[in-house]
Image (spheres, rainbow, N blue to C red):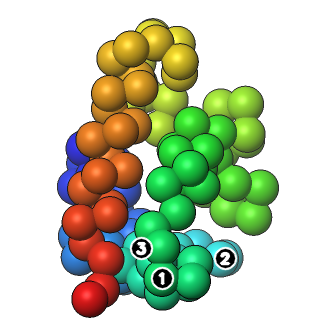
C-alpha cells in the first residue's frame, strides 16, 4: 500500500523525496523521522488520524472529510474492519521505517 499510494510523494524510502515531491507547494515530510520529531516515541494515534482524515496543512491529502486515500479504502467506511486493518498495517509499516 505504501509504495502504491504514499511513495509518489513521500518516496519509496519515505524520506519525502518521491517523484511528485518537487511539484508540491508544501514538501512532504520525511516519515522516517516521526519518532525523532515526537520526543522519541512513534505517534501511532497521530498517524492513524492523518491516514483517516488527512491534514489541513497538506492539501494534496485532500479535505479532512475526503482524504486522497479514499480510493485505497474503496467503498468501505473508514471505520469498517477492513479499513481499520489497512490503516493499522500501513501505520506499522511506517513505524518500521523509523530512523534508529
Cα separation, mark 3 vs mark 2, equals 18 Å
Depth check: give the residue in front, 33 or 41: 41
**Label 1 with label 3: CB-CB less than 8 Å:** no
Depth check: give the residue in front, 38 or 59: 38
**Label 3 with label 2: CB-CB less than 8 Å:** no
Earlier-in-chain disc, 1 versus 3:
3
Depth check: give the residue in front, 94 or 64: 94
Quarter in which the N terminus is drawn: top left
- Judging by the rendered image, the residue that carries numbered circle 2 is 25
- Judging by the rendered image, the residue that carries numbered circle 3 is 31
Earlier-in-chain disc, 1 versus 2:
2
Does residue 52 sit above or below 92 in this rendering? Answer: above
Q: Position of residue 11 (x, y in %)?
A: 30, 73
Depth check: give the residue in front, 26 or 49: 49
Residue positioned 41% across, 73% down in the render:
31
Does residue 20 sit above or below 65 in this rendering? Answer: below
Secondary structure under badge 3?
helix
Pointer 3 local density, CA inside 10 Å: few below 14, some 14–19, many at least 20: many
Secondary structure under badge 2?
loop
Earlier-in-chain disc, 3 versus 2:
2
- Judging by the rendered image, the residue that carries numbered circle 1 is 40
Amino acid at each position: 500500500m505504501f509504495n502504491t499510494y504514499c511513495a509518489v510523494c513521500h518516496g519509496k524510502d519515505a524520506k519525502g523525496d518521491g517523484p511528485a515531491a518537487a511539484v508540491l507547494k508544501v514538501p512532504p515530510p520525511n516519515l522516517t523521522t516521526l519518532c525523532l520529531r515526537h520526543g522519541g516515541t512513534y505517534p501511532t494515534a497521530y498517524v492513524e488520524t492523518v491516514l483517516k482524515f488527512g491534514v489541513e496543512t497538506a492539501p494534496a491529502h485532500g479535505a479532512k472529510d475526503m482524504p486522497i486515500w479514499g480510493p485505497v479504502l474503496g467503498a468501505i467506511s473508514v471505520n469498517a474492519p477492513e479499513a481499520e486493518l489497512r490503516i493499522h498495517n500501513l501505520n506499522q509499516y511506517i513505524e518500521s521505517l523509523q530512523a534508529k
